[in-house]
Amino acid sequence: MQGVAGPPRSPHNAAVTALSSLAGLGKAELAEKLVAIGVEPRKAKMRAEQLWRWIYHYGATDFGAMTNVAKELRATLAERYTLARPEIAAAQVSQDGTRKWLVRLGPGVEAECVFIPDVGRAGALCVSSQVGCTLNCTFCHTGTQKLVRNLTAQEIVAQVLIARDALGEWPTPERPLNDGDRQLTNIVFMGMGEPLYNLENVSAAIDTISDGDGVSISRRRITVSTAGVAPRIKELGERTGAMLAISLHATNDELRNQLVPLNKKYNLAELFDAIRTYPSLNNAKRVTFEYVMLKGVNDTLAEAKALVKLLAGIPAKINLIPFNPWPGAPYECSDWETIEKFAEVLNRAGYSSPIRTPRGRDILAACGQLRSESVKQRASERLKAAT
Ligand code: SAH
């Protein structure tokens, strides 16, 4: 077992983490926390909205800054709660400007998130929804890490707060920030884990991230990627209004069973039936199909043509992803020429099919390279590690 226990906590840290943080909570949860410290229930909603704006619009990390909140309440808040973000266990910056954070969510529980400049309107944050993954896609590094646990909605939202902190793009009442100045404009659920196996929390997190009084990233700029959990696809659309991405990677069941074992549970026919039920698909709201280019495995022109057939009638764009290598990976990336020819077939059929430029490969931050050392521990092991 590797690196399961975090470094020993200093007494100072222990005291700080004993207070729970409000940063990342949804509106209703925030109101409950206020009632718990004596705010009148009928005033809690209004107070929660005030706090909300400080937390998510201004990125406050200190109750003292909340000038429109009564002094007494600010003091009580500071006694009982914090606005702390989870600890950043490691931060890396790639040569190409991509940034990766390893976020510590508890002792031995770590997830990665990645900021990629110059994608989407200005830049996208790739967030994790689980620590580890259950799917075991054979080309994915995260798939080599067993599921530790689902992230809470608060932990998902905290990744966005951490990125905004690091990018230094919180406005202040004196210094408003125009939307056009923002670096972080898009969110993609393409980090560790399968978002549709944690839909409850993903959906709650999207409510907080998209709220116009707060982080204010519109649902149209939030994309949720799934390996194909067919029975939850429609529900994802109904609950979140997010953009849908499907990790397809193969055009026939035989190959897809190998690459994405989840296909044995929900085959291509079932998956495509589900995709067709995604609410409000049209040419302005297309499904993104992700297709990883694996040398000699799924990259023939016949497969490009099969892909065109498969997508018939679905408003779609295709993202060709050059395979990103990781230590011990059993695949190679297709040759550039092959990828371009593959793209050409799709383009000729009328599909936008950009080739995703690998970003942050040098810090293992590119698609499918994320992984943390966290492993699931039994309660007895956890106890041992803590002592
Ligand atoms: N479980 C979800 C969310 C992860 S998204 C899903 O599968 O969609 C991560 C994306 O990167 C997916 O499209 C995944 O298939 C792709 N990917 C995984 N490993 C990769 C690799 N080594 N190189 C390129 N893309 C990879």
Image (cartoon, rainbow, N blue to C red):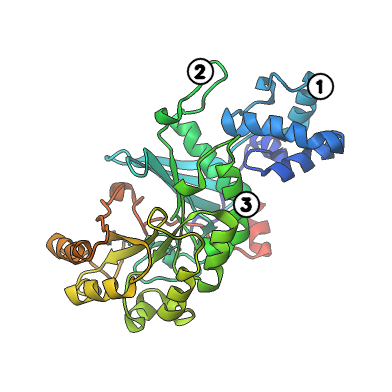
Q: Which of marks 3 and 2 is nearer the N terminus?
A: 2
In the rendered picture of this protein, how many numbered marks are placed on residues?
Answer: 3
What is the quadrant of residue 345 in the picture?
bottom left
Q: Which of marks 3 and 1 is nearer the N terminus?
A: 1
Q: Is residue 129 left or right of residue 32?
A: left
Q: Which of marks 2 and 1 is nearer the N terminus?
A: 1
In the orientation shown, which residue stands out farthest toward the left?
Answer: 337
Residue 219, placed above or below residue 253: above
Tell me if I can see residue 307 in this picture: yes
- C-alpha gap between disc 2 and disc 1: 27 Å
- Front-most of 177 and 367? 177
- Front-most of 351 and 25? 351
For label 3, the residue is 204
Picture quarter with ligand 1: bottom left
For label 2, the residue is 175
**Residue type at numbered disc 2:** Arg
Residue 351 position in % (x across, y down): 27, 61
Secondary structure category for the residue under label 2: loop
Residue 251 position in % (x across, y down): 31, 76
What is the quadrant of residue 379 in the picture?
bottom right
